[in-house]
Image (cartoon, helix red, strand yellow):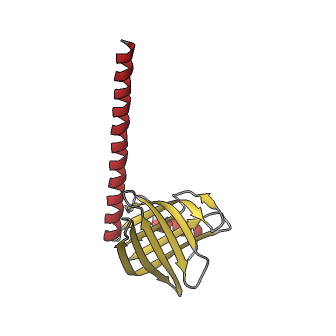
Amino acid sequence: MKNIVMILVMILLSTGFALSQQQYESSDLVLYQTAIKAIKDRNFVFRANTYDDGHHLYSVDPKRNFIILEDDKVTIQIYESAQNSFAAEFSPSNFKMKMNKSGDVNFEMLCKNKGNSLKIKITVEKGSGKCIVRGVPINFHSSFVLMGELSEYNVSDLIRTSILQIFQLN
């Protein structure tokens, strides 16, 4: 009798694990599809949770570290510390999007404002909404790498003008 109960418990546990794994994978796929659609629509917000300065990885606040592409305007805010922060608006151009052999989607755009140029490269990992963003300035600051998630942008998510007024960085 104990053996039968143990077998039933093991079957139930393994079935529950398999179902939860499938649900996890399907939610990752939804995040991936949403991220790709947002990039194609050129209406997204990337929220960073990790900042890489080339020497260390830092956990960062996604509410203070983001990139928004909306209505042909890019807002970039990186806030590592009070001494090391950046916020500015850019006009985007030269959009490129392609899928590599492993299924990751690569998106690039050139961002310009008042004499500054910045190339943004976004890689969306296959099957998830997780992204790596590489910012390569052409004539200012240093390069940066951010890791986080990309999703469709809604005005209620972040308010561009309030954030730029708070930091008053252009």
Whether residue 90 appears in this view of the structure is yes
Q: Position of residue 163 (x, y in %)?
A: 52, 65
Whether residue 71 appears in this view of the structure is no
Which residue reaches farthest front?
3
Report the side of 80 relative to 75 (left or right): right
- Front residue of 57/14: it is 14
Q: Is residue 27 above or below residue 42?
A: above
Q: How many marks?
A: 0
Q: Residue at x 59, y 65 (%)?
A: 52
Q: Residue at x 36, y 62 (%)?
A: 35
Q: Is residue 1 above or below residue 139?
A: above
- Front residue of 11/24: it is 11
Q: Is residue 58 above or below residue 91?
A: above
Q: Position of residue 135 (x, y in %)?
A: 52, 74
The quadrant in which the C terminus is found is bottom right
Q: Is residue 86 above or below residue 149?
A: below
Which residue reaches farthest bottom?
115
The quadrant in which the N terminus is found is top left
- Front residue of 97/67: it is 97
Q: Position of residue 44 (x, y in %)?
A: 38, 66
Which residue reaches farthest right?
83
Q: Position of residue 12 (x, y in %)?
A: 34, 27
- Report which quarter residue 123 is drawn in: bottom left
- Front residue of 139/85: it is 139
Q: Residue at x 68, y 67 (%)?
A: 83
